[in-house]
Amino acid sequence: MQRRELHRLALAWALSAWAVAAPAQAAGRRPGAGPQWQADPFALGVASGQPRADSVVLWTRLLIAEADAAQQSQTQTVVCEVFADEALRQPVRQWQVETDARRGHSVHVIASGLQPSSFYWYRFVCGSATSPVGRTRTSPREGDKVALLRLAQASCQHFEQGWYVAHREMAQRELDFVLFLGDYIYESSNPKYRLRPHLGGVPQTLDEYRARHAQYKGDADLRACHAAHPWVMTWDDHEVVNDYANDQDNRYSDPQVFLRRRAAAYQAYFEHMPLRLGPDAAQPQRMRIHDRMAWGQLAELWTLDCRQYRSHQACPDPNRGGARVVVGCDALQDPSRSMLGAEQEAWLMPGLVGSTRRWKILAQSTQMSSSGVATPLGRSSFNDAWDGYPRARERLLSGIAEAGLQDVLVLGGDVHMNVAAQLRVRPNDERSPIVASEIVCTSVTSRGMGEALLASIRENNPDILHARSDERGYALLELRPEGVQASFRATPFPAKSDSVLREQARCLVQAGRAGVHRA
Ligand SMILES: [Fe+2]
């Protein structure tokens, strides 16, 4: 066992001291004992995530209303009940968990001892209150043959900019899990598109980030999508602040000041998500989110962290940091620049090149294919996406090419457009073989770039097979041993609460042959 893994186990153990208590029967507690609530403390709903063959994370957070203010300072006892059937007649196990204000009254139960490839229903009880019922599932065993994996790939859900009709549809579908690739909340506002305003200003403190997450979870469609499926997640920048990179924000704040803000944002994120690990107890500005999961012999999936460890953006504006389009930026070619950080790269590559599963899925935040355009001064690069880290991209894709892998699928979000693209070691160079296939999902609500710019990106990047930024939605992926089908589900009307998604385009990837094709 590597040191990192030991460290991770130690962290998991430290967290389990408060996250997971003994089964409730052993503690002799009855559900129903405890506070008599005036307002529903389960208004944020329930969620599950990070499925394994024998366990899944079950989440809720008590939201304590003014009417129950006396409960705010109390340690609350919450019972989590797991059932094998929708009618809740077949109890499987229950856990009793204590939570308090230091963790925002959040509850994370690692429900273990479960059967592989099985559905479970769960709910939480605290005093007189009972939560809505959620449905979740476990993954197949690592060695199992699996005929089909269905997942919904989503990202970028600015609350102000539209309704969560994508979540409404995802909640209704038969899926194995939802793969959410970042920008779950937005810290900022754009007055141009404000259907339903954020409460409060730009969050800086833990309480402000908590309030922002709570407002997002106030959306019934989002809660329904969490209750319907386990989620597998990574984050992007807006969970903290637009365009941050490692310890640097877009205002060049003192890194020590920014890292305190990042710690607050990470803590609030953990408190609202079905995640196994929270912030590192010794260094709360650090939180491990990158993870690896197998879906039987069919797929292996790595969720990557493209924010916490990355090199700062190259050639930034000295007055306003963060993302920008750069031309003639020599610093891009510095081989020491990294999107994932050296440690995460070193963790990823051996597992990826050694994987014996059919589909190797890199689930990460942004677009990997190039989107530069020709200008009179040379080709442009958007320095916040993988174009801003070309040598790191080349390392990753060369590693895939040298290992002879054919079935690598890169999934991304962030850019508010649907993209299907070929990935080559040398982007857009036909002499450089295609080594992987890319699917980027459009945003759930956040508005996309204008058509003129997108037309120029398409024209300058023959590797891009499909790109549309005018519609909102998600991507529905069906993975089978013989191929992958990606359907871009979308609507041009995110501002209409009753809009319905339809298929914008469908793409295929054939097993044994890297590259994406139109259906
Ligand atoms: Fe976004």
Image (cartoon, rainbow, N blue to C red):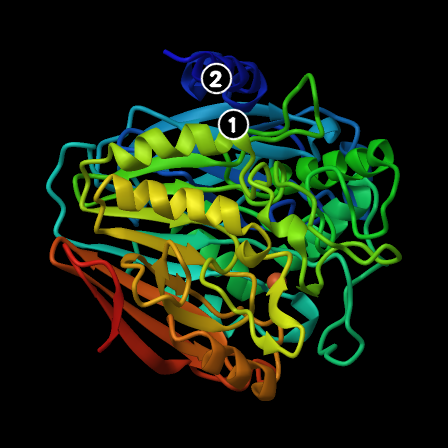
Please report whichever mark, 1 or 2, sits nearer to the chain's N-terminal start: 2
Of residue 470 and residue 92, the one placed in the foreground of this image is: 470
Residue wearing tag 2? 4
Could you tell me residue 111's position as x and y percent? 39, 29
Q: In this orientation, which residue lies closer to the viewer: 406 or 365?
A: 406
Coordinates of residue 51 in the picture (x, y in percent): 35, 38
Figure check: 279 above or below 146: above
Type of amino acid under label 1: Glu
Q: Answer left or right for 268 relative to 352.
A: right
| Residue at x-position 27% and y-position 41% | 402
- Report the quarter where the N terminus lies: top left
Which residue is rendered at x = 71% and y = 35% of the image?
104
**Do the residues under discs 1 and 2 have CB atoms within 8 angstroms?**
yes
- Residue plotted at (73% across, 42% down): 64
- Is the CB of the residue bearing disc 2 within 8 angstroms of ligand 1? no
Marks 1/2: CA distance? 10 Å
Disc 1 marks which residue? 343
In this rendering, the answer to whether 333 lies above or below 9 is below
